[in-house]
């Protein structure tokens, strides 16, 4: 039997405030620098998922980031998987921007794609960004003059 919990508006708001406080506390209590753990990750990779191993793996106390080569019609890019260490479902835009800046630098361009429904792959609490080449001039980016 499918029992669905129905939360009141005040309960939903309280839950959202608690989640936001947890994230603030986690980050203020030590959002650590990312460490490159690629070698350790490669040593512990099972034969089952070694067909497409990440090029790089980064970890801090909040997030894990895996980087894969991804050829596109715009040239070679990097497909970047980001998720919370505890697999919670949401990462805000500001945090994604911070992760991008911390690992790849503040002047690199990453794109997030919302695909056609027929191409959607939504099987885990992860975010995918596409890191463009260093000299990439994004045709849809607002430029400061």
Image (spheres, grey):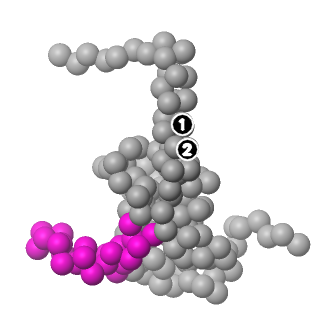
Say which quadrant the C terminus sits in.
Answer: bottom right
Q: Do the residues labelled 1 and 2 touch (CB within 8 Å)?
A: yes
Element assignment for label 1: helix
Percent of width and height locating residue 95: 56, 55
Name which quarter of the figure residue 10 lies in. Answer: top right
Residue at figure coordinates x 26%, y 16% from the top left: 3
Percent of width and height locating residue 118: 39, 52
Badge 1: residue crowd in 10 Å (few <14, some 14–19, many ≥20): few
Q: Which residue lies furthest to the right in this view?
A: 145
Percent of width and height locating residue 9: 53, 15
Relative side of 34 to 54, left or right? right
Residue at figure coordinates x 38%, y 44% from the top left: 88
Relative side of 76 to 118, left or right? right
Image vertical order of residue 7 relative to residue 117, above or below: above
Is any atom of residue 51 visible in this view?
Answer: no
Give the residue pinned by disc 2. Answer: 24
Identify the magenta region: 34-59
């Amino acid at each position: 039997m499918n029992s669905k919990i129905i939360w009141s508006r005040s309960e939903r708001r309280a839950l959202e405030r608690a989640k936001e406080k947890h994230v603030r506390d986690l980050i203020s209590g030590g959002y650590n620098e990312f460490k490159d753990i690629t070698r350790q990750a490669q040593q512990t990779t099972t034969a089952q998922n070694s067909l497409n191993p990440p090029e790089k793996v980064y970890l801090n106390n909040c997030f894990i980031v895996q980087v894969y080569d991804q050829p596109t019609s715009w040239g070679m890019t990097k497909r970047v998987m980001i998720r919370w260490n505890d697999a919670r479902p949401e990462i805000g835009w500001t945090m994604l921007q911070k992760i991008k800046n911390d690992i790849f630098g503040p002047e690199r361009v990453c794109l997030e794609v919302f695909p056609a429904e027929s191409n959607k792959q939504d099987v885990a609490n992860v975010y995918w960004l596409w890191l463009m080449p260093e000299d990439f001039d994004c045709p849809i980016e607002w430029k400061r003059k």
